[in-house]
Amino acid sequence: MTDFLTGYVVAAGAGLTGDPGLKASRQSTGGALSVFAASIGAGPPLHVHDRDDECFYVLDGALPVRCGSEGFDAATGSLVFLPRGVPYRFRAAGPAARLLVAVPGGIEDYFREINAASGDDERTQIGVRHGIRVVPG
């Protein structure tokens, strides 16, 4: 983390640390938040974040979302808030894109590790380290 933050801009099509989807990171924001732009082909299983809140803005498409016992449809232009401690999942209803914001920052480390994982056991251990766990349902 940096002691003295500076403003910055990430140009269209560019990203931090060689990842075109990563627009803000724990390092670039002093730990405040992380921001990703991403296309979604499917969606994650039902899971819980113990350490961070997420919200996303739907840039294109539609995302049916389950958060706790609630279900809702998030169409283009919708903002979805997903609090820590509440199980959630979403499914792309066709091609979709979103801008994800996670608070506090650092979820980019989880994504980097989970995308390189070789199997379910490794994915489970990565989740444990980052306070993210898949739950039944």
Image (spheres, grey):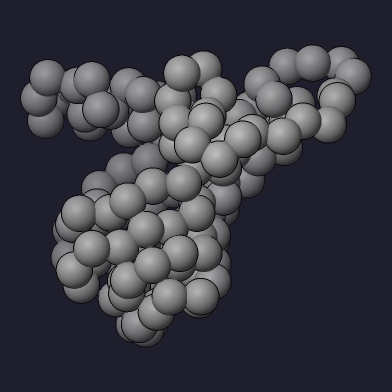
Quadrant the N terminus occupies: top right
Where's residue 72, x and y in %?
37, 83
Where's residue 101, x and y in %?
57, 50
Residue at 35 percent of width and 82 percent of height: 73
Nearest to the observer: residue 117 or residue 46: 117
Where's residue 48, x and y in %?
38, 52
Q: Residue furthest right?
A: 4
Q: Quadrant of residue 46?
A: bottom left
Q: Is residue 10 left or right of residue 51?
A: right
Regarding residue 131, the answer to whether it shows in the image is yes
Nearest to the observer: residue 76 or residue 124: 76
Q: Residue furthest front?
A: 12
Regarding residue 68, the answer to whether it shows in the image is no
**Above or below, 19 relative to 43:** above
Q: Quadrant of residue 68?
A: bottom left
**Above or below, 50 relative to 3:** below
Residue at 52 percent of width and 30 percent of height: 14
